[in-house]
Amino acid sequence: MPNTPDSVYDYYDITDIIGEGTFSTVGLATHKFTNEKYAVKVISKDCLDKQKRSYVDWEISILTKCSHPNIVDFIEYFESDEDICLVLEWVSNGDLFERIVKKGVFTEEEARLTMISILSAVEYLHDRSIAHRDIKPENILFNNERGDVKLADFGLSKFYDESTGLDSACGTPAYSAPEISSNQVYRKSVDMWSVGCILYFILYGKPPFYSDDESTICRLVSKGEWSFPSVMAKNHSLSVQNLIKGLLDRDPVKRLTVKQALNHDWITQSQSMVLEYLSTIQEDSISSTTIDTTNRKSSILSSSSTKPISIKQSLLRSSLNSSVEYARGYLTPPNNLM
């Protein structure tokens, strides 16, 4: 249950607007009693029909069950007659899109730690029968300068049954798998396609499927037509190119799973980095804390010098919510996740 009849404004001072989506606004907030900073996603009920309300309910349902160092923490939520407010961990270092635009593409060493972080988060979700369905640079937030990141925005995420899969169209065209673009039944492997697009993006400065026209992007994705930039491809190892090819396999059955990707030689070749990172995850998990809510009703649920390829930010930068939103059919979460 949400924190009612209390208002989010009883506990948080919401100041700067740090993002705006299709039917929500994200503000930077300071907790009145702890002075800790958080991000508050304010969703106006005037903008919610039954379909959009289901998006919000799914987001809350899934985030209550997620606790991982590479997933943005969901603190609590409030609901009033006017709006629904989700209180989230505030990650202050910007998102992956901003990082590439400002500092240029990554070297392979820089990319490796970021990909380990992303894959770790995706593995956690997939092990719990959750498909994110909207992995893109704007939804990957930088946790620190090492390249450690956190996956955010679960507005299109969903529990799913492997035997039946999913069939609703959603996501952002440049990062959505061809089975979504082709209106086919799909499964969690769509996230791995998105991960492949992310790896391509941070190495080459633009997604593998790029055009000024969104319908052209959808056609290219549907056909799986992409290639490595001829000028820059020679600057990267065959190993990382092999990983990208495995992630962007048009056949979802042949596409690399998250565990296969984590075991790929490009990821594992720097064992010391992997072991150090996994050790950090364990330490973070042990030391993680939440704000004290014992005195009120609570609903706590539980840089590279290489210049990027010139891209049109207005075309690549989508809203906090997906640029393509369709109805998501109802699917009961597996019993062990209820």
Image (cartoon, rainbow, N blue to C red):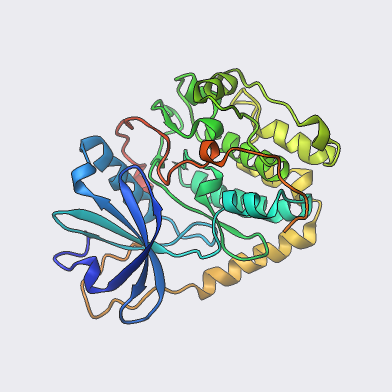
Name the spot of residue 299 as percent of width and height, x first. Answer: 27, 65
**Relative vertical location of residue 65 with respect to residue 205 in this rendering, above or below:** below
Q: Quadrant of residue 27?
A: bottom left
Depth order, front residue of 221/293:
221
Name the spot of residue 138 as percent of width and height, x first. Answer: 52, 48
The total of numbered circles placed on residues is 0
Q: Is residue 146 visible?
A: yes
Q: Is residue 48 left or right of residue 76?
A: left
Q: Is residue 338 visible?
A: no
Q: Residue furthest right?
A: 234
Depth order, front residue of 227/288:
227
**Relative vertical location of residue 120 with respect to residue 247 in this rendering, above or below:** below
Q: Is residue 242 left or right of residue 316?
A: right
At x 48%, y 34%, the residue is 172
Name the spot of residue 130 as percent of width and height, x first. Answer: 45, 43
Q: Quadrant of residue 295?
A: bottom left
At x 61%, y 29%, the residue is 210
Q: Considering the image in quadrants, where does the N terminus appear?
A: bottom left
At x 56%, y 27%, the residue is 212
**Relative vertical location of residue 60 with respect to residue 214 in this rendering, above or below:** below
Q: Is residue 98 left or right of residue 48?
A: right
Name the spot of residue 179 as percent of width and height, x first. Answer: 51, 23
At x 40%, y 25%, the residue is 167
Q: Is residue 73 left or right of residue 257?
A: left
